């Protein structure tokens, strides 16, 4: 038996992904989803390290290192030594990276507004509460009784 919640969520995620892809294309953003997530992560946590990003994103350190190298070569981020621990490099967006982060935020805001169009604020708030509770349920490794 399939889950009506799961099927609805699957359809919503695919519709949202399509809206995001279309929005990025229209805005001329030619980055991979992983690169976009990396830019967003650095924008929201300036001075973060590759290790921090790897842990937050639950991604392989090698994959994160390749993303950093690619974004650095694109001129979107820079690395600098950590002031207390020279083994670590902190990450910061360049001015071009900050501009890209703002363009990404704009696309995401437009897609979010489209998704929530004509929905009462109370419904949106409740949806967010339910989605966050579902995330916790899925990430809790206890077996349901």
Image (tube, rainbow, N blue to C red):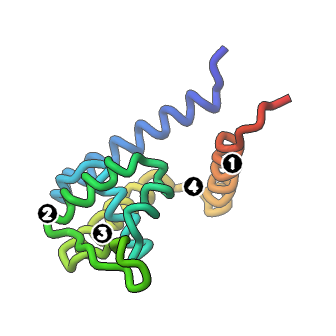
**How far, Cα to Cα, is label 4 from label 3?**
27 Å
Residue at figure coordinates x 30%, y 72% from the top left = 102
Residue 30 in the image, given as x and y percentages of width and height: 17, 53
Between circles 3 and 2, the one closer to the viewer is 2
> In the picture, which quadrant includes the N terminus?
top right
Q: What element carries label 3?
A: helix
Residue 58 in the image, given as x and y percentages of width and height: 48, 49
Where residue 13 is drawn, which disc sits there? Answer: none
Number of callouts in the render? 4
> In the picture, which quadrant includes the C terminus?
top right
**How far, Cα to Cα, is label 1 from label 4?**
25 Å
Residue at figure coordinates x 19%, y 65% from the top left = 72
Q: Name the residue under label 1.
A: 136
Contact (CB < 8 A) between labels 4 and 2? no
Q: Mark 2 points at which residue?
A: 74
Q: Is mark 1 on a helix, strand or loop?
A: helix
Say few, some or many: other residues with alpha carbon within 10 Å of mark 2 (under 14 / 14 to 19 / 20 or more).
Answer: few
Q: Mark 4 points at which residue?
A: 119
Between circles 4 and 3, the one closer to the viewer is 3
Residue 37 in the image, given as x and y percentages of width and height: 36, 56
Contact (CB < 8 A) between labels 1 and 4? no
Check the image and name the residue furthest to the right. 145
Task: Tell me which numbered mark, 4 or 2, is placed earlier along the sequence.
Answer: 2
Q: What element carries label 2?
A: loop
Contact (CB < 8 A) between labels 1 and 3? no
Residue at figure coordinates x 32%, y 60% from the top left = 107
| Quarter of the image where one finds residue 140 | top right
Q: Name the residue under label 3.
A: 101
Residue 134 vs 90, above or below: the answer is above
Say few, some or many: other residues with alpha carbon within 10 Å of mark 3 (under 14 / 14 to 19 / 20 or more).
Answer: many
């Amino acid at each position: 038996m399939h889950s009506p919640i799961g099927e609805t969520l699957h359809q919503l995620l695919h519709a949202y992904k399509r809206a995001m892809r279309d929005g990025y294309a229209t805005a001329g953003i030619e980055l991979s989803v992983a690169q976009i997530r990396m830019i967003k992560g650095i924008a929201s946590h300036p001075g973060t390290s590759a290790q921090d990003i790897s842990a937050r994103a639950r991604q392989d350190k090698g994959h994160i290192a390749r993303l950093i190298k690619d974004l650095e070569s694109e001129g979107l981020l820079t690395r600098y030594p950590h002031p207390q621990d020279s083994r670590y490099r902190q990450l910061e967006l360049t001015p071009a990276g900050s501009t890209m982060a703002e363009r990404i935020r704009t696309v995401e805001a437009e897609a979010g507004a489209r998704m929530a169009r004509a929905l009462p604020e109370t419904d949106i708030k409740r949806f967010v509460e339910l989605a966050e509770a579902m995330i916790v349920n899925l990430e809790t490794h206890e077996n349901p009784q």
